[in-house]
Image: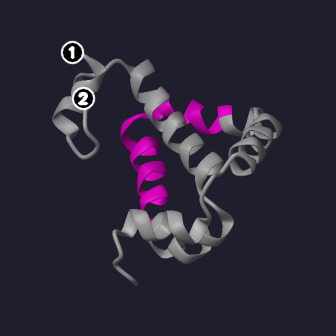
Amino acid sequence: MHPRVFRPGNLQVRKQLAPELKYHAVKNDLLLLLKNESTANFVKDFALIAPRRLGVLLYTLVREPYSLKAYWFILRNWNRVRRMRRLVQQRAVISPVTMRERFLLGVRH
């Protein structure tokens, strides 16, 4: 099965994926959040982010222990992740407020 067939929430398809692909999915999801989310938007969206992150962690603990190494990867490479985050944040061409508005499509919380 091609990895691009998988969509989050489709657990039947996820069961068919190789453990290495699932590990990279968890790792890349964490990296995406850590590198790209502005501190201001993270704080504003914490009530939405925290349950999902906790759900992913619990699912990984129970159903995909192999993917736990994604968390170890983040911890082991924490300084590198922070450097990458700094670069991404420095290169931002729009403000966190504008980014939030675009992703919310004008919907205010």
**Marks 1/2: CA distance?**
11 Å
Q: Quadrant of the N terminus?
A: top left
Name the residue at 42% across, 60% down. Answer: 52
**Numbered range of the magenta stretch:** 51-73
Q: Quadrant of residue 75?
A: top right
Identify whether 64 is placed above or below 17: below
Quick check: is 52 in the magenta stretch?
A: yes
- Chosen colour scheme: one colour
Name the residue at 48% across, 50% down. Answer: 57
Identify whether 56 is placed above or below 20: below
Q: Nearer the viewer, residue 11 or 8?
A: 8
Residue type for callout 2: Lys
Q: Which mark is residue 15?
A: 2
In this rendering, does residue 58 appear at all?
Answer: yes
**Where's residue 90, x and y in %?**
75, 49
Q: Nearer the viewer, residue 56 or 96?
A: 96
Q: Marks 1 and 2: CB-CB under 8 Å?
A: no
Residue type for callout 1: Met
Q: Can you identify the residue that label 1 sits on?
A: 1
Q: Quadrant of residue 27?
A: top right
Q: Nearer the viewer, residue 16 or 62?
A: 16
For label 2, count other residues whose C-alpha is less than 10 Å away and answer few (under 14), some (14-19) or many (20+): few
**Where's residue 70, x and y in %?**
57, 34
Q: Nearer the viewer, residue 79 or 107?
A: 107
Of labels 1 and 2, the one closer to you: 1
In this rendering, does residue 50 appear at all?
Answer: no
